[in-house]
Amino acid sequence: MSEALAVISEWTLPLVVSLILVIGAWRRVPIYQTFVQGAKGGFSTAIRLIPHLVAMMVAVSVFRASGAMDGLVQLLDPVLTWLHVPAEVAPMGILRPITGQGSLAFMIDIFRKHGPDSHLGLLASTMQASSDTTLYILTVYFGSVGIYRFRYALAVGLMSDFVSVLASVFAVWLVSGMIQV
Amino acid sequence: MIDFIWLALFLSGVATAMVTGRMPMVSSAILKGAESGVELCIGLIGAISLWMGLMHIAERAGAVAWLARKLKPVARRLFPSVPADHPAMGAILANMSANLLGIGNAATPLGLKAMEELQKLNPHPDRASDAMCTLLAVNTASITLIPTTVIAIRMQYHSAHPSAVVLTTLVASLIGTCAALVLDRLFRALSHRRQVR
């Protein structure tokens, strides 16, 4: 089961790319020329994001480097503990929506300390995989079309991130109850 | 909104640095942050170009239209304001499929394409439309079938069950996505009521 899934995850990308190329060739699309035409837009799209990401990354790295992030983690820690989110992974729940790289680093740290197959390791994996970097997605998606008024999108994103953290705790509890991982 | 977040991150950071005495770290973090913003974008060029190229082929071959037909009933409910035959619908559906397959690198460029199309339908170009907020909600809490990156790292750390995370992720992200959609509807209703007043 686990090996089959590992194979699937390795095969997905090559198979999807091949499939698209084969379908294109079969429908007599000039595939190379069409690819190049489409890919041309990638450069300008990425370049358009630079000012937005620079702005957000500067603010986030100031927030982290100053220790304010650690303070926030400490502040929210009792609440998360009360909600049965283990103290060891609680900071990850807070990091996840702000910095994908940061929470990934935190997950690896837990792997080193407790092992990937421990309860905490599995919980950290689930938290990392089941949510996304909300702040980054908001910045990139809205930035690409020049939207400055996010309305309620951030509130919805952060609140559902919180639900995802609790859902991860629930899911790991559920699965490790059913099968001994 | 964005003004407030930006200012809050900055000021709380600087204020904390005054107390903790980490001002030197903060001052180098400002420039490092700017640098990593550019690095992230440059790193994205390859993935974005690749998927935009492949999607162009899929589009010309009619594959996107086919997928859109299959998923249309779901998407029509999620995005009632988007006309079913508008290119935005195709891009939204492609973005949702990529998220589902866990090809995260593909989801972002497809999502950007969807935003571009949604912007054409948006009467206020600087303000997010309802459909855009829903797209963001779907993306931030994406349902994931195969969390490729996490599985790869678990393998690297000698996990006996690297893909044990697949089932837990499915359960957790399913709950998360449902919550995101419910919250999206709730906030949308609230914001419309405010506008009417």
Image (cartoon, coloured by chain):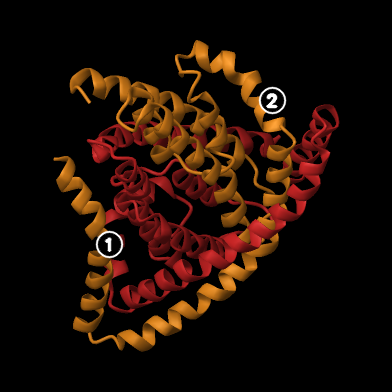
Chain colours: A orange, B red
The x, y position of residue A138, in whole percent, is 58, 49
Numbered label attached to residue A27: none
Left/right of residue A159 with respect to residue A143 in the rendered view: left
Viewer-nearest residue: B121 or B5: B5
Classify residue B3 as left or right of residue B118. right
Which residue: 82% across, 37% down?
Answer: B14
Q: Chain of mark 1?
A: B
Q: Which residue is mark 2?
A: A71
The residue drawn where x is 69% and y is 57% is: A54
Q: Quadrant of the C terminus of chain A?
A: top left
In this rendering, the answer to whether A92 lies above or below A58 is above
Q: In the rendered image, which quarter contains the N terminus of chain A?
A: top left
Q: Position of residue B141 (x, y in %)?
A: 44, 40
The percent position of residue B187, horizontal first and vertical second, equals 57, 34
Can residue A52 be seen by looking at this rendering?
no
Q: Quadrant of residue B95?
A: bottom left
Within the image, what quadrant is residue A114 found in?
top left
Q: Position of residue B118 (x, y in %)?
A: 53, 60
Task: Say whether residue A1 is left or right of residue A18.
Answer: left
Q: Is residue A29 above or below residue A86?
A: below
Q: Residue at x 26, y 79 (%)?
A: A24
Helix, strand or loop at mark 1: helix
Seen in the picture, residue A89 relative to B41 is either above or below; the reply is: above
Q: Amino acid at mark 2?
A: Gly
Q: Residue at label 1?
A: B67
Chain letter of the residue beneath label 2 in the structure image: A
| Picture layout, residue B172 above or below residue B87 | above
Q: Residues within 10 Å of mark 1 (few under 14, many from 20)?
A: some
Whether discs 1 and 2 lie on one chain: the answer is no
